[in-house]
Every structure is written in structure tokens, then in C-alpha cells.
Amino acid sequence: MTNHNTQKPCAIPFTQSGSSPPASPTLQTLAIHAGQGPDPATGSILTPIHQTATFAQPELGETTSPDGHTYSRCSNPTVSALEANLAGLEGVPHALAFKTGLAAITNLLFTVLQAGDHVIAGEVSYGGTVRLLRDLFVRFGVSCTFLDVTDASAVAGAIQANTRLLFVETPANPTLAVCDLSALGNIARENGVLFAVDNTFLTSVIQPVFCHGAHVAILSTTKYVEGHDSTTGGALLTDHPELFDRLQLTRSATGSIQAPFDAWLTLRGLKTLPLRLKQHSDSARFLAEQLLEDSRVKAVHYPTLPSDPGHRVARRQQNAGGGILSFELDSKAVRPFLSALKLTTLAENLGAVETLITHPATMTHAQLSVAERSRLGIAPGLLRLSVGLEDPADILADLQTALEASHILEVQA
């Protein structure tokens, strides 16, 4: 596949302030206004919820809707408003919204792969992605090589004549390993391979991906985009019109479009995405630095820390660290630590206003064998922390209290 990307600037400002007007709308402004405007029928500032299955067609071949909506399995005005906003924030012409992030990934795979094709994917990835490629698509004659995508030379060496897709997420879930998007984009372009990036952890607010050669950006909008634990959703974004048409056909055929009310909730959350991500990032950086100094913590993973292996690449392709960090305790301390937490909630989600903590070995990556988890750095004592919007000092106090409780019990044992 040829590279249809236009080179887009990667240095998108988080916010832009001062007396001089910006050359173009900033992300904070785009999040509120991109693809949006008062409802032409009523003047409503907020996009209406078009909670309908079907749309009247006054004559054969004609639609009442100026955008051609006929049936909400194919398209819906509220969903289209969300898609316009997502595309505007990303700086690409096309976006499609789905019921879940996993539905978005599934539709991408169904669209671009067929029997006999080969995929290269990051070995540390969201568990649902691994299950799809390893357990489901293999039944349809699709092979997949999972490897360390932080090693660009290994990726280049794994390219086969039938490789059709390079699928990565960065930072990786849950180890926060960072891959070099520009290097991988060059490899994909040189070999005619579709390059897809799961950008759920950072979104385009922190990490634009199309300027690095990506053909598709993937988002679980359940996470930071909606941001309030209110609904599930996913999105695919692309600057390639022909690929967009094919993705749209697959979504219609599989019936996996997002529901109007869920799209409305997601659109409402999007308006504050840049502001929330800035606070998530500031708080996560503060907590990572504090945990790094705590002798009861064996390791801390946060890419913008100077001590992190991905620091150099992260500083080049991210404008902040994001709201996710992971840290490792002695495995015997995990259960008492989690039990002692009061403010922080044990849950599998991330990207919400509440601080959430996950134990990957028994939750998100439980389907992997002990040997696989060990090889990938998912230790029994590894915990993933999604830092919320509470006062970071309160989150730290909660973590420190739980660390003290777990340490006392560990010593007594």
C-alpha cells in the first residue's frame, strides 16, 4: 500500500496562550468547536440526540436528511457530529465511531486482511487485540508475528511478502514501553504495509500519529475521550479516502456503529479532553517521581521520566507523559496494598476522572501464560495506575498509606 499521508506538523501545542493570536485554532478550541455549531433547526448549542432507528424518505432515491441518513445502523446525525469532532481534533478528514474500542479494531482487521495475509503486532498490547489476532483471525488464515516493536530493526526483519498490516500501540499497555513511530512509519512506507497505531493512552492531544506515517489511528473512546466512565466506544481515523469507504462498508455490514446516546456522551466528554489530559499528565508525573523515590517500590514506568528506557523517544513524539503509569511491588505486597486503598479504585478501565488501579497479571493480561507475562515484563507485582483528577496530594497519601500497610503485613509474614 502506498503512503497517502500528507506531512502534518507534529509539534501541536498543548495550549497556546499569550497576547499574540495563534496561527490556527489550538487543540483546546478544536475540541469544543471542530465540526460543531448550533443546531440549524432549533439553535441548540449542544448537538441533539437523534435517538431514532430510521429516517423518513419522502420519495424514492431521496432523503429528508441533507447528509443522507436513512438508517442508524449505517449513519446517524449524532454519531456523525462526534466523528466530525474527532476528525477535526486529529487533523484528518475521516473518522468512524464504534460501539467499543475492540469493535473498532475488529472492523479494521476485517477490512484490511484476508486469508493468507500476515500481521506484525507489538508483543505488549491490549489483551483484546492479542486475542483477536492469535485466537480468532488465525482461524481465517491470517498469521501474526508478535514482537518487540521498540526494536525497529526487528520489525524490518520480520516483514514478509504477505505482510499487510503493522499494528502497534505506544505507550504499550501495561509496561508503558515506547516505540519510535517515525522509524516504524518509514518501514511501513518502504514495504507498502498499512500502519495502524492504537493511540488510546495519549490521543492526538499528546501524540499526533499521522505526521509519523500512520494510515490509521485507533482510539478506545471509552477511555480519555469520553473520560467519565459513562459509556463504551471506539473510533478509527484515517486520511485515506478509499480506506475510509471500505471501513464504512464493514461497519455497516457488521452493525457495530456507536449508539446515538453513547455518541452524545462521548462528544460531551471530548470538549474538555485537552484540559483533562494536561491535569492527568501533571498529576501522573508528580506521582511517578514520588514513587520512584520510595524504597518499597521496585520499579516505576513512566516514559517522560529521565530514568525510563523510552524517555528519548517519548520526549520527541509526545508533548506530555499522559495519565498512565505502572509500578512494581513485591508480589506478596500486592493484595494487602490493594485492600488498603481507600481513594483509588480497583478496576479494569482507565482514563476516567477517578483514579483507577489494575493488576494486569490477574485482570487485563490474565489470558497470557505465566512464562509469557514474565518475558514481556508483566511481573506478578506490576500495577497499572490510571491517575484521575483528584488532588494529586490526596492520591499520593492514599498510595503511601497502602504501601505502609502492605509493608507492615509483609514484614510480619
Image: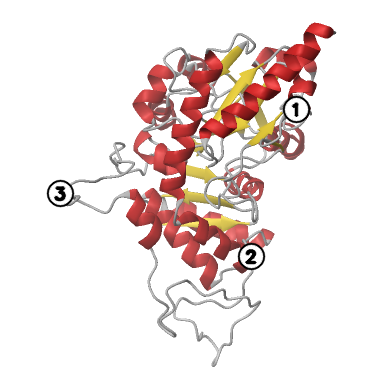
Residue 111, image x and y in percent? 59, 49
Q: Residue drawn at (48%, 43%), measured in percent from left and top?
A: 217
Q: Residue drawn at (54%, 40%), measured in percent from left and top?
A: 200
Do the numbered discs 3 and 1 sit on residues whose CB atoms are within 8 Å? no
Crowding around mark 3 (Cα neighbors within 10 Å: few <14, some 14 to 19, many 20+) is few
Q: Look at the numbered disc 2 and give the secondary structure of its residue.
A: loop
Q: Can residue 372 be spotted in the picture?
A: no
Determine which quarter of the picture holds residue 354. Answer: top right
Horizontal side of 201 relative to 54 (left or right) equals: left
The disc labelled 3 sits on which kind of residue?
Ser
Residue 176, image x and y in percent? 55, 24
The disc labelled 1 sits on which kind of residue?
Ala
Determine which quarter of the picture holds residue 10. Answer: top left
Q: Residue drawn at (56%, 73%), measured in percent from left and top?
A: 49
Determine which quarter of the picture holds residue 260. Answer: bottom right
**Tag nearer the camera, 2 or 1:** 1
Check disc 3 and report the residue beneath it: 19
Q: Look at the numbered disc 1 and give the secondary structure of its residue.
A: helix
Q: Residue drawn at (53%, 12%), measured in percent from left and top?
A: 293
Check disc 1 and report the residue beneath it: 340
Q: Look at the numbered disc 3 and give the secondary structure of its residue.
A: loop
The disc labelled 2 sits on which kind of residue?
Ala
**Tag nearer the camera, 3 or 1:** 1
Check disc 2 and report the residue beneath it: 259
> Which quadrant: the N terminus?
top left
